[in-house]
């Protein structure tokens, strides 16, 4: 009896999580995320699946971030009609996120096609056609009825003879690690492993005993600063920018990072540690997602529950404004007073944040605040690496704003945290596969595992298959 795994995404790269598992005569997909990077490469990778979508029997989804869930509507568009098993919070988040992803793709395709029509030329897509969205809002709507909610720690028979149990991953609201049992084997898929003491969400549960581990390695070569540094650093950045009359423009994932920033700013204002300047969350998606956060208080940690019990709204305060309307979003660029603009996407690749960066990176009074991991070739990564000129909407923009990073809020465990997380399964594990990391980080993580635990580790390549 064999189990076969093929790594279709997040192989030697951070985005596009997608792993094809064949077991007990069935085909399962673990995550189905969007790859983010060079536009043409991303379009090619995301559009074409390396297996027939109609022949997939089930999808197991670890969490709602777009690099894990964002290609589900395309899977459905290509013929998938089976169940998508995940947590209740993830379902509510995906209901907003997948619709928003489709909306953004449609609008960006329209924008690029209009721009190129004005220039009297077409984008080269390899077939002479204009740019098309990967999937439509109708495709996203058709995906939602396929979701099936599973309870944390509940062992479910997802397909005949194949069982799945979810555990708290501590990465974002509703995030899980997945233990899959089939053909006398136990496979643990880490999903994205979080950190202790992250704002709002519960701490990750340590790994469950298994024979095979598929583990993320985003920060496999580094250590984070303690979470206690985050508030002090954030206060310092906000106060310094406000003193010089600038804006803080923060690309932030609509799910998780936006809510964490809002809560931290709320606490800093409450405690008198920062100037009380206007705060704008400019993302219709983040607004919808925040409502899901309000709904799923069962996912909160003790501190956030206490904040709620004291009558405080973790995601609302006097100086905070949520912006839905496009015209109100555009009006933020005309503000000439210190303020904070939090907007998606987190890697500054799509959405309203791109417009805010276009209008603000040229002003030395401003600060671009990077609050999460930035994949290779994304606009966020280029800003983080100090490039003095970047392309925004295909046009060069000079970067004069200060660029700061706040890694302390990272939702990904660092090297030592991952080693501690996996320790309980080291007595049963036969093999470890590292995914969701750039190759340099994965090499460092693999060496650390071998040194501490003397266990076999493989860094799979894209579309590489292993029989377990």
Image (tube, rainbow, N blue to C red):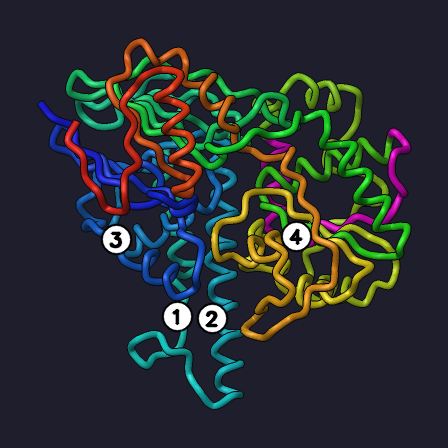
Q: CA distance from mark 4 to mark 1?
A: 24 Å
Q: Earlier in the sequence, mark 4 or mark 2?
A: 2
**Left or right: 114, with 261 as reference point:** left
Q: Earlier in the sequence, mark 2 or mark 3?
A: 3
Q: Which residue is mark 2?
A: 109
Farthest residue toward the bottom?
A: 120
Q: Quadrant of residue 63?
A: top left
* Whether residue 68 can be seen here: no
Residue 158: x and y in percent read 26, 27
Q: Which of the marked residues, 4 or 1, is nearer the chain's N terminus?
A: 1
Q: Which residue is mark 1?
A: 132
Q: Which residue is mark 3?
A: 49
Q: Residue at x 47, y 66 (%)?
A: 106
Sequence-first tag of 4 and 3: 3
Mark toward the start of the polypeptide (1 vs 2):
2
Quadrant placement of the N terminus: top left
Q: Which residues are magenta?
A: 271-295
On screen, residue 394 versus residue 8, left or right, reads right
Residue 132: % across, % down: 39, 70
């Amino acid at each position: 009896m064999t189990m076969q795994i093929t790594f279709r995404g997040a192989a030697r790269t951070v985005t596009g999580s997608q792993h094809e598992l064949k077991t007990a005569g069935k085909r399962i997909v673990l995550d189905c995320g969007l790859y983010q990077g060079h536009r043409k490469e991303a379009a090619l990778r995301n559009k074409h699946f390396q297996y027939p979508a109609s022949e997939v029997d089930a999808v197991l989804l670890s969490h709602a971030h777009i690099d894990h869930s964002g290609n589900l509507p395309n899977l459905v568009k290509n013929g998938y009609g089976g169940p998508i098993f995940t947590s209740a919070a993830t379902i509510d988040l995906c209901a907003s996120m997948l619709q928003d992803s489709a909306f953004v793709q449609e609008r960006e395709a329209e924008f690029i096609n209009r721009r190129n029509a004005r220039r009297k030329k077409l984008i080269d897509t390899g077939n002479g056609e204009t740019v098309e969205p990967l999937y439509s809002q109708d495709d996203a709507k058709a995906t939602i009825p396929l979701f099936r909610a599973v309870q944390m720690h509940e062992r479910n028979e997802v397909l005949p003879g194949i069982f799945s149990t979810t555990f708290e991953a501590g990465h974002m609201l509703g995030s899980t690690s997945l233990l899959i049992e089939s053909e006398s084997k136990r496979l643990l898929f880490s999903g994205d492993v979080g950190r202790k003491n992250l704002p709002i969400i519960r701490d990750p549960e340590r790994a469950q005993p298994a024979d095979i581990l598929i583990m993320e390695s985003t920060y496999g070569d580094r250590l984070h600063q303690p979470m206690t540094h985050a508030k002090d650093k954030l206060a310092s950045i906000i106060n310094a920018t406000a003193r010089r009359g600038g804006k803080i423009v923060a690309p932030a994932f609509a799910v998780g990072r936006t809510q964490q920033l809002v809560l931290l700013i709320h606490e800093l204002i409450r405690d008198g540690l920062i100037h009380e300047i206007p705060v704008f969350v400019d993302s219709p998606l983040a607004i919808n997602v925040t409502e899901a956060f309000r709904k799923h208080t069962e996912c909160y940690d003790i501190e956030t529950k206490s904040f709620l019990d004291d009558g405080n709204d973790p995601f609302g305060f006097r100086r905070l404004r949520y912006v839905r309307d496009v015209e109100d979003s555009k009006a933020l660029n005309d503000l000439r007073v210190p303020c904070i603009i939090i907007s998606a996407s987190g890697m500054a690749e799509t959405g309203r944040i791109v417009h805010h960066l276009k209008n603000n990176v040229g002003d030395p009074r401003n600060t671009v605040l990077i609050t999460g991991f930035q994949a290779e070739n994304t606009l966020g990564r280029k800003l983080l690496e100090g490039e003095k000129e970047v392309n925004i909407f295909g046009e060069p923009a000079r970067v004069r704003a200060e660029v700061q990073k706040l890694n302390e809020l990272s939702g990904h465990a660092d090297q030592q945290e991952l080693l501690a997380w996996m320790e309980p399964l080291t007595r049963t594990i036969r093999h470890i596969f590292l995914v969701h990391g750039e190759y340099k980080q994965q090499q460092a993580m693999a060496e650390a595992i071998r040194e501490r635990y003397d266990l076999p580790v493989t860094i799979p390549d894209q579309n590489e298959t292993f029989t377990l």
